[in-house]
Image (spheres, rainbow, N blue to C red):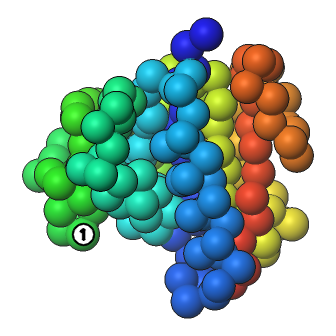
Amino acid sequence: MKINVAFTGSRKYDIMDNENNDVMQNVADLLVGCQYIDNLYFGCAVGVNTEMLIRIGSTKPALTNFKKSLIACIPDTLDHLHPGALDAVNKYADEVIELKNEITHKDWFKSFHIRDKFMVNHCTKLFAFPNKFALENKKGGTWATMKYSFKNKHERVENMDWNEEKQTIVYPLNGGS
């Protein structure tokens, strides 16, 4: 069984909230320990995407049998990535996919949506970390990615089953607006 995982998450959440940190660390620990995972796709946006790359990537040096590929999916090119995200990509990513969709003010979100759709199309498990406000109001990029996953036959589940394909697992975070 081969599992590919992707992440979507809020840029706006309380980074100092212990519950948020515990949830993200628990998911990172679960994924690092899973022998079935081949690839993990990270959107490399500031916030949850980059945080999860750092949490999972930082475990690699301590694990001799770490066989997962950490793949950074960049909507445009590395030249246009936020410096903090670029540092994480340079330090932890095994592979970088530059989708080369220019980020413009006219269609500000189009390149991000293309990146998110690419990741959903390549994953069997989507881990979504929306802030509670965005989830309740069904707004924002994380919600749009979740909605796309549901249209592509991903089932929203509370408890993941490694044997089931096309699942979206949602972990609402505190903070944000």
- Count the marks: how many? 1
Q: Is mark 1 on a helix, strand or loop?
A: helix
Q: Where is residue 98 in the image (x, y as percent from the top left)?
A: 23, 34
The foreground one among 45 and 7 is: 7
Q: In the rendered view, tell whether residue 109 sits above or below residue 88.
A: above
> Residue 63 vs residue 79: left or right?
right
Residue 91 at what x, y percent from top left?
Answer: 17, 54
Residue 136: image quadrant is bottom right
> Which residue reaches farthest top?
1
Q: Decide if residue 176 is on the left or right side of residue 40.
A: right
Is the residue marked by circle 1 packed among few (<14), some (14-19), or many (20+) residues within 10 Å? few
- Seen from the viewer's position, the closer of residues 171 and 69 is 69
Residue 147 rendering spot, x and y as whole percentages: 75, 39
Up/down of 62 relative to 102, above or below:
below
Q: Residue at x 77, y 18 (%)?
A: 163
Q: What residue type is labelled 1?
A: Gly
Does residue 41 appear in the picture of this structure?
Answer: yes
Instruction: Tell me what residue is drawn at x 67 percent, y 66 percent.
Output: 23
Q: Which of the 4 image quadrants contains residue 148? A: top right
Q: Give the quadrant of the C terminus.
A: bottom right
Give the residue displayed 73% in from the left and 25% down from the top. 162
Residue identified by numbered label 1 = 84
Q: Decide: is 31 above or below 25.
A: above
What residue is drawn where x is 45% and y is 34%?
Answer: 40
Q: Where is residue 170 in the image (x, y as percent from the top left)?
A: 76, 51
Question: Which part of the image, by quadrant, shows the N terminus?
Answer: top right
